[in-house]
Image: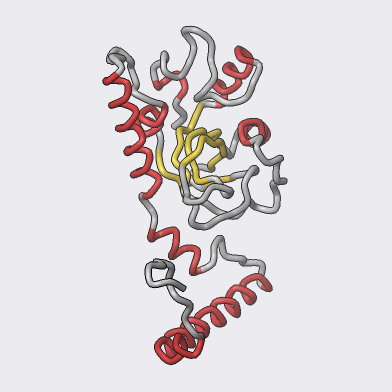
Amino acid sequence: MGDNDNRPSRIKVEEVFQSFGEPIICFGWFIFVQQVIENQLRSWGLLPVASFITIYESMSTSSLITKQLKETAAQLLRFRQDAGQNGLRYGSLEEFVLKYGKLYKTQRLPSTFRRGQFKLCFSNSMTMAERNADKLIYVEGFAYAPVITPPHPVLHAWCVDQTGTVYDRTWGFDGSREYFGIPFKLSFVRKMHRLTNTYGVLEQGVPGWTVYDLEPEIFLSK
């Protein structure tokens, strides 16, 4: 390795253990206890929604997606202003979602629901909302995709129950993933589907009938 090489040098395992041996042992003991507890809960049929570590990770980044959406909305607004586009009702899709959306908590998809096909979140979620109209609400907005690093919000659809818990048929479970979206009335989602012959709400519509033209009481679910 040359004198000007900025790559970090490799550290011997013995040096790490001598410096951090006790914390590593304690952390390993914590992982062991966690697994014992979760295995016992599984045997009782009380599998936790997320592991203790996953819950901690989720708590530590609880506002990241909101922050990123606000930053993107501000950047797009500046671009539009610089281009002389000042008469729009909303500066961006992100601004619209921030105005009417909310943050949702994730969970493992209950075993009573079948996973849908990857990359078909809009149809997967509409189908689930149709089949469970008395329990679930269709939501569209942004979430962290499982294949993008570093995490970046992408357009996505899912369902939520009355407690605001996510039911995502499309992506695998990640306890640290954040969802921020708008709950839509199923009647509005159905009408949009009939008008456009495709799935999805936020990027679809016909002249005079998009979410950006309408008052929130027409499309916004409670």
The residue shown at (54%, 19%) is 204
Query: Where is 85 relative to 121, above or below?
Result: above
**Left or right side of 210 for 89:** left
Residue found at the far front of this picture: 2
Above/below status of 211 relative to 6? above
Query: Percent x, y for residue 52?
Result: 49, 69
Please tell me which residue lies in front, 210 or 147.
Answer: 147
Left or right placement of residue 189 versus residue 117 in this view: left
Q: Residue at x 34, y 44 (%)?
A: 67
Which residue occupies the foreground of this view, 111 or 24?
A: 24
Q: Is residue 19 above or below residue 152?
A: below
Q: In this view, does 103 lie to the left or right of 125?
A: left
Residue 84 shown left or right of residue 146 in the figure: left
Identify the image quadrant of residue 173: bottom right
At x 51%, y 26%, the residue is 185
Nearer-the-camera pick, 118 or 77:
77
The residue lying at 38 percent from left, 67 percent from top is 4
Residue 178 % position (x, y): 46, 48
Q: In which quarter of the image is the C terminus?
A: top left
Q: In this view, does 161 lie above or below 13?
A: above
